[in-house]
Amino acid sequence: MIIETSAPTRVDLAGSTIDIPPLFLFHEGASTINFAIDLLAKCRIETRDDGLIVLESVDRGDRLETTVDRIGELKDEPRLELLSKLVYFFRPPTGFHMTTESQAPAGAGLAGSSTLNIACIGALNRLVGERYTPDRFIPIAANIECQVIKVPTGFQDYYSAQYGGASAIHFAPDGIHREKLDLDLGTLQGRTVVVYTGEPRNSGTNNWEITKRHIDGDRELFDLFEAIRDTAAGLRAALLANDWDSVGELLRASYPQRKRLSPMITTPHMDEVIETALANGAIAAKVCGAGGGGCIAFFCEDGRKTDVESALRDAPGAEVLDCRITETGLSISVSD
């Protein structure tokens, strides 16, 4: 049996970091706005009849082997740690070869690891006979990723990976729910440029440090999160109304908020890339993920996307990514 899965990465537009538990519990109405892009994370599982388990990452160029009767050793395996912990959790009773790869650049800030997590869970769950219903995939992914990174992890990335499209992920005491945003994706696509800065992300925003400061009662940080919450709510309304002028204004205003949250969110090279884009038709810059490298998404003036792309292609160390918004989330196929 061969199982093949894929899931889309994402661009986060507003509400980043507020998706980390328990921070969203202190900001009523907290939400995150993002959209999925067709730079996919993929997982392929082919069963074996010899009891051997092979885990292979194309991106990392790494591979490890064990056997079904030694699967317990994967609990504390440091190599390919996410894959190892997922296999340990599911404990398939048969041998198999699992191969993973991601189309997003390394350290891009596009949620590559969380997306791969969902793709692997979809494949492993099918391997063990659909032990869990799809609504359990996201809690499993978040909990296992927490075991890997050893701090709480934000939830927004799993929703884009599993469901695709443009989303508002709402956080409340009674749980988390995704709202599919019915908006003009063609216009959003036609005014958005995603560029990889050539610098792998180096955690420009230290999410654990921010979480600790917030819980310790940092009032300035609390007020900043209130502003992040309000920006996300405003952006949702503007997108649903196809009010693109307001979209640009809100995204432009949110950039200083992110800089206040962490001055390390951009590097000098990223600042140069942003200046180039803003001088050639971009209205606003949105650093993807935690920043400190990785990708930047630019919202452009109407009709100026090609100008921005042309300017960025000429900028040293910048790569304009060929990607599109996708409404397809986790995809699973099975063959003999």
Image: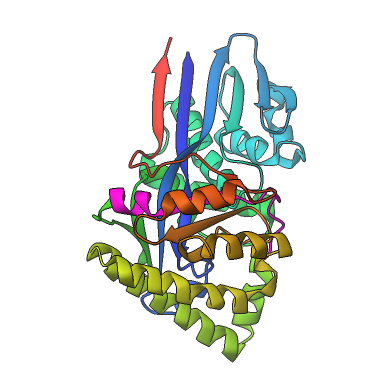
**Residue 95's spot in the image, x, y percent?**
61, 17
The total of numbered circles placed on residues is: 0
Magenta stretch contains residue 191: yes
Q: Which residues are magenta?
A: 186-204
In x, y percent, where is residue 288? Answer: 55, 58
What residue lies at 66% left-to-right and 48% top-to-bottom? 107
Does the stretch in magenta take in 201? yes
Please tell me whether residue 266 is drawn above or below residue 40 in the rendered image: below
Residue 205 appears in the figure: no
| View extreme (bottom): residue | 219
Above or below 252: residue 66:
above
Q: Nearer the viewer, residue 228 or 27?
A: 228
Q: Position of residue 201 (x, y in %)?
A: 68, 54
Between 13 and 150, the residue placed more toward the observer is: 13
Q: In which image quadrant can residue 88 be found?
A: top right
**162 in relation to 67, above or below:** below
Residue at image coords 49%, 54%: 308
Would residue 83 be found to the left or right of residue 242 on screen? right
Residue 95 visible in rendering: yes
The residue depicted at 40 percent of the width and 37 percent of the height is: 330
Give how far across and how far down residue 101 sits, in percent. Answer: 59, 31
Left or right: residue 14 compared with residue 207: left
